């Protein structure tokens, strides 16, 4: 897999997901607390999770 130097600068794609409403609400609240867009919070969480998975 080719990873750009800064994944946050890569072009974004619109997608749809089915997520539990309570989890989505918590994520939105956390994004507000962190002063970032919800999409950025989700991207960072996925990058962190995928990185930890690759370390195993």
Image: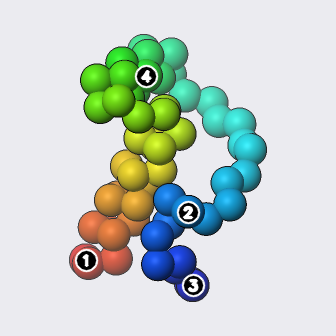
Q: Residue at x 71, y 36 (%)?
A: 16
What is the CA distance from the residue labelled 4 to the residue labelled 1? Answer: 30 Å
Q: Are there few (<14), some (14-19), or many (20+) residues within 10 Å of tag 1? A: few
Q: Is residue 31 left or right of residue 52?
A: right
Pointer 1 and pointer 2: residues touching (CB < 8 Å)? no
Badge 4, how many Cα within 10 Å: few under 14, some, many 20+?
Answer: some
Does dot 4 land on a helix, a strand or a loop?
helix
Determine the secondary structure under disc 2: helix
What SS does tag 3 mark? Answer: loop
User: Is residue 30 in view?
Assistant: no
Label 4: which residue? 28
- Residue 12 seen from this side: yes
Q: Looking at the image, tell me whether mark 2 or mark 3 is earlier in sequence order.
A: 3
- Number of the front mark, 1 or 2: 2
Nearest to the observer: residue 12 or residue 50? 12
Nearer to us: label 2 or label 3: 2
Position of 40 with respect to 54 (left or right) is: right
Q: Which residue is mark 2?
A: 9
Instruction: Give the residue pinned by disc 3.
Output: 2
Q: Earlier in the sequence, mark 1 or mark 2?
A: 2
Q: Give the residue at the far bottom of this rendering.
A: 2
The residue depicted at 47 percent of the width and 50 percent of the height is: 43
């Amino acid at each position: 897999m080719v990873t750009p130097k800064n994944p946050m600068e890569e072009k974004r794609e619109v997608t749809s997901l089915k997520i539990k409403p309570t989890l989505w609400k918590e994520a939105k609240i956390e994004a507000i607390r962190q002063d970032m867009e919800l999409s950025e919070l989700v991207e960072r969480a996925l990058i962190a999770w995928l990185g930890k998975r690759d370390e195993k």
